Amino acid sequence: MEVEINNEIYNVIIERKRSTRNTYIRVKDNLNIFVTCNILTSDRYIIQLINSNSKQILKMIEQVKKRQRKKDSFYYLGKKYDLVYLNKKGITFGENKVFVNPDFDLDKWYKKEAEEIFQIELNKMYNNFVYKIPKPSSLTIRKMKTRWGVCNVKTKKITLNLELIKHRIECLDYVIVHELSHLLFANHSKEFWKCVEDNYKDYKKIRKELKEDE
Ligand SMILES: [Zn+2]
C-alpha cells in the first residue's frame, strides 16, 4: 500500500497482530511507514489515521533523514564518505560525499564493483607472483564473518570477503597474496609466511590493519 503525504509517495507496510490492541505508526530507516495494528483493523482506517496524523508523520520522516545524515558513513576502497540520501536514482560520488536513493541496494552495488576490481587484482597478483603456482580455478566473492579470504587447495578455488571493498586496495592485494601462497603451503608455516613476504613486503602492517590474528 502507498500513501501520499506532501506530494511524496511513501510505502506503507502493515503488520497485523492478534495481540495488538492499538494502532502504531513508525517510520523506518528506508522511509517506509510501518504500521502495527490488530488483525481486524481495515486498510481504510489505516489510511484515514495516516492522513489525520500526516503532520506528525512528516516530522518522523524528517527525524529519520536527519539521523541518517549525521550517522551514516560509506566506505569504498579505504576512503570514508558521508552517505546522503536523496530522492534521486542510483549512486553519485562527490568529493567526500556519496548520494544515494534510500531504496538503493548498496550491497548489490558493492558486489558488482568487487567482482570487477577483485578479479583484476587477482590476475595482477598472480602474474607478479615470484614463485610458480597453479592458476586459481575460480574466484568467489561473498560476505564472511570471520575470514578475509579462503583458498581451497584441492579445487584451487579462491573466495574473498566482500568487505575488502571497503578497505584500501593494498589490503585486498595482501589477502590475495595470502590465499595464493596457500596454493604452495596449505598451513600457516614459517615457509608459508616467507612466501607471503616475498610477494608482499609490508604484509605485517596490513595484517594489523585488517586485525588478522590467525
Ligand atoms: Zn591462511
Image: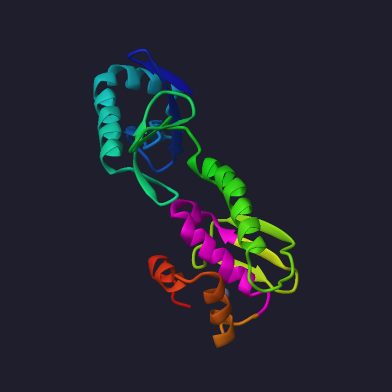
Check the image and name the residue furthest to the bottom.
190
Q: Quadrant of residue 17?
A: top left
Is residue 154 shown left or right of residue 104? Answer: right
Residue 31 drawn at (x, y percent): 38, 31
Residue 148 can be seen in this image:
no
**Residue range (magenta):** 160-184
Q: Residue at x 37, y 32 (%)?
A: 94
Is residue 91 shown left or right of residue 21? Answer: right
Q: Main secondary structure of the magenta part?
A: helix
Q: Residue at x 54, y 56 (%)?
A: 143
Q: Residue at x 55, y 75 (%)?
A: 198
Q: In the depicted view, which residue is nearer to us: 67 or 15?
A: 67
Residue 150 drawn at (x, y percent): 60, 68
Asked if the stretch drawn in magenta spans residue 138, the answer is no
Report the coloring of the rendering. rainbow
Residue 212 drawn at (x, y percent): 44, 72
Residue 46 can be seen in this image:
yes
Residue 11 drawn at (x, y percent): 45, 26
Is residue 134 shown left or right of residue 96? Answer: right
Question: Count of labels shown?
Answer: 0
